[in-house]
Structures are given as structure tokens and as C-alpha cells.
Image (cartoon, rainbow, N blue to C red):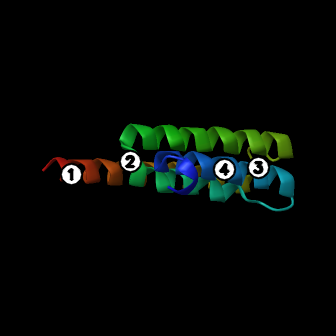
């Protein structure tokens, strides 16, 4: 990857960027669902465990942003958490299938 950043750090960079933009934008602009981009990218570079960790980090960051912005537990945030969890589960499955194919 350009700039010397290992490609495996891209999902983490996306999570940091989305979290920063969400906090800077304030509660009126809901970027929380974009945290699912981290776990969506993770299977390209990481195995199922790394994808799961990326998803867990996305959920933690989402909860933290929701807490700071005062909408923790709102319908919008719960839907974003569910989407992130679903994308993470699908990514873990995709990563496992990819790894199995690489071994064969």
C-alpha cells in the first residue's frame, strides 16, 4: 500500500477515519453505520479472528461515539450495531472460505 502502511491496517484506518468524522460532524449527522466498512474490508487482509476483532472494535467505537453524542441505545444506533455485527459475521465466513481455498 502506498505510503508504507501495511494493507492489513486499512480496516483499522477506516475505523479511525469514520469515528473521527462522526465525532467532528456531531450527532445531527449519523455516520455510525459506516463503521461496518472496517469489518467489511477486514476479510480481504485478515483471517476470521482478525475480522472478528475488527468487528468488535467497530462495535466498541460505535458505542463510544453513541455515548458521547447522547444516543446510546437509540433505534438508529441499535440498527447500526446490528448491521456491523452482520457484516462482521459475513466477513468471518468469507475469510474462512478464502483461507480454505488458499490451503487447497
Residue 32 at x, y = what percent?
A: 70, 55
Q: Position of residue 37 (x, y in %)?
A: 56, 57
Closer mark to the observer between disc 4 and disc 3 = 3
Residue 78, labelled with which disc? 4
Quarter occupied by residue 12:
top right
For label 2, the residue is 92
* Residue depicted at x 34% and y 54%: 94
Tell me the residue that label 3 is attached to: 20
Find numbered disc 4 in the image and state the secondary structure of the residue it sits on.
Answer: helix
Q: Which residue is mark 1?
A: 102
Q: Residue furthest bottom?
A: 29
Point out the frontmost of discs 2 and 1. Answer: 1
Q: Quadrant of residue 44?
A: bottom left
Please tell me how many numbered marks the rendered image carries.
4
Which mark is first along the chain, 4 or 2?
4
> Could you give the CA–CA distance between mark 2 and mark 1, rounded to whole angstroms?
15 Å
> Which of pointers 1 and 4 lies earlier in the amino acid sequence?
4
**Which residue is found at the position 44% from the left and 44% from the top?**
51
Label 1 vs label 4: CA separation? 36 Å
Q: How far across and down, in percent of the image, does residue 104 sit?
A: 12, 50
The answer to whether marks 4 and 3 mark residues whose Cβ atoms lie closer than 8 Å is no
Assess disc 2: are there few (<14), some (14-19) or many (≥20) residues with their C-alpha within 10 Å of its C-alpha: many
Amino acid at each position: 500500500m502506498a505510503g508504507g502502511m501495511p494493507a492489513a491496517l486499512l480496516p483499522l484506518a477506516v475505523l479511525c477515519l469514520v469515528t473521527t468524522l462522526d465525532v467532528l460532524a456531531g450527532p445531527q449527522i449519523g455516520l455510525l453505520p459506516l463503521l461496518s466498512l472496517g469489518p467489511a474490508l477486514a476479510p480481504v487482509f485478515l483471517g476470521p479472528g482478525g475480522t472478528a476483532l475488527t468487528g468488535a472494535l467497530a462495535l466498541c467505537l460505535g458505542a463510544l461515539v453513541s455515548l458521547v453524542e447522547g444516543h446510546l441505545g437509540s433505534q438508529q444506533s441499535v440498527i447500526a450495531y446490528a448491521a456491523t455485527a452482520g457484516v462482521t459475521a459475513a466477513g468471518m465466513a468469507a475469510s474462512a472460505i478464502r483461507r480454505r481455498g488458499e490451503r487447497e
